[in-house]
Image (cartoon, rainbow, N blue to C red):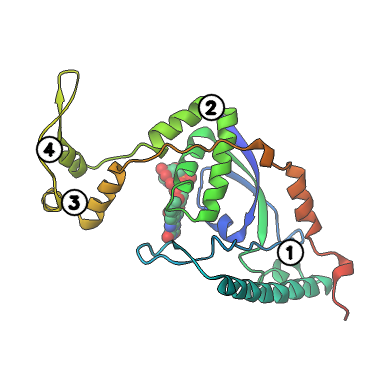
Amino acid sequence: MVELKFHCCMPMFIARQWIRHRTANVNEYSGRYSLMPMLFYTPSAEQLQTQSPVNNQGRSGQTVELAKYESAVARWNGIRERSREAYEWLTGEEIARELARIDLPLSTYTQWYWKIDLHNLLHFLTLRVDSHAQWEIQEFGRVMAGMLERVAPLSYEAWLDYDVCGTRMSHMELEALRRLVKVQGEGLSSQAGQVDGNALAELGLSGREARELLQKLAPKERPSFTLDASRGLPGEHFQERFSQAVPKGDRLPEP
Ligand SMILES: Cc1cc2nc3c(=O)[nH]c(=O)nc-3n(C[C@H](O)[C@H](O)[C@H](O)COP(=O)(O)OP(=O)(O)OC[C@H]3O[C@@H](n4cnc5c(N)ncnc54)[C@H](O)[C@@H]3O)c2cc1C
């Protein structure tokens, strides 16, 4: 069995989504045992978008004006400074780390070793490079897919063809397509006609299912997750940043 082990560092709000994938072995940095790094994730101006009007679980694609972005960052920084100060004070006072951490924001980082077999990695990647997943976890998924391409290129290509660009279809969806396409000999031929919204409803597709069918059949570009190795940084770089951000005694505020 092929197994892959990743050393990952991500904001807490991403770790909460990632940990839902139960088929991996996880060995996470312990905030009870070790000091937490004072590293905070700040979305770029491009990513600070308004709430999507059609998908309660997503952003609209619409960025905000620069002044609003700066105002958001200033607010985040204010909260972060206070929580950092409290954390450094509490740990400086030798309060247990497991309690000192309780008001650190979800933007702070954790890290873990994540070991998973190839089959379940592909499942994870399919869900997490998908446009419905939060952009930040998509970013991790895209890099991990690029890593996969380098170590298991055949599996990677098959995953793109069958999972990322493939789809499952319900009985009703297939019935709709059978009205337009029929099996003929060794191949397929088209049947004249149209399956409009009413016909889809008669076949039993709800409005949402009908919209999903159209999305499935819309032209889709085959993505590439090939890594640009020139942009890569060694793991030690991140390890160093992580450990540099751990509070030091000499950074504690004056009593
Ligand atoms: C876009 C998106 C939005 C999401 N929104 C929400 C949300 O709003 N709320 C929320 O709570 N979660 C949400 N999730 C998380 C989601 O519900 C799953 O928990 C997560 O995607 C992990 O998927 P999984 O269970 O298939 O993966 P894994 O845990 O990796 O499991 C892989 C597969 O193994 C099998 N398996 C694993 N464990 C068991 C078991 N104990 N018994 C039987 N079969 C098992 C299943 O077939 C499963 O699909 C979201 C996920 C995505 C991708």
Tell which tag, 1 or 2, sits nearer the viewer.
2
Q: Is mark 4 within 8 Å of ligand 1?
A: no
SS under mark 2: helix
Q: Earlier in the sequence, mark 4 or mark 1?
A: 1
Taking the spot 36% from the left edge, 36% from the top edge, the residue there is 166
x, y (%) of residue 112?
A: 66, 49
Mark 3 or mark 1, earlier in chain: 1
- Residue bearing the label numbered 1: 38
Q: Position of residue 222 (x, y in %)?
A: 42, 36
Is 163 drawn above or below residue 87 in the view shown?
above
Residue 153: mark: 2
For badge 3, the amino acid type reads: Leu
Q: Is residue 60 left or right of residue 254?
A: left
The answer to whether the residues at label 1 and label 2 have Cβ atoms under 8 Å apart is: no
Q: Which mark is residue 179?
A: 4
Mark 4 nearby-residue class (10 Å; few <14, some 14–19, many ≥20): some
Give how far apart the Cα atoms at labels 2 and 3 are.
38 Å
Between disc 1 and disc 2, whose residue precedes? 1
Q: Residues within 10 Å of mark 2 (few under 14, many from 20)?
A: few
Q: Amino acid at mark 4?
A: Arg
Name above or below for residue 87 compared with residue 110. below
Does label 2 or label 3 sit earlier along the sequence? Answer: 2
- Alpha carbons under labels 1 and 2: distance apart: 38 Å
Name the kind of residue labelled 1 in the image: Met
Circle 3 crowding by C-alpha within 10 Å: few under 14, some 14–19, many from 20: many
Q: CA distance from mark 4 to mark 1?
A: 60 Å
Mark 2: amino acid = Pro
In space, the residues marked 3 and 4 are separated at their CA atoms by 15 Å
The residue shown at (50%, 48%) is: 21
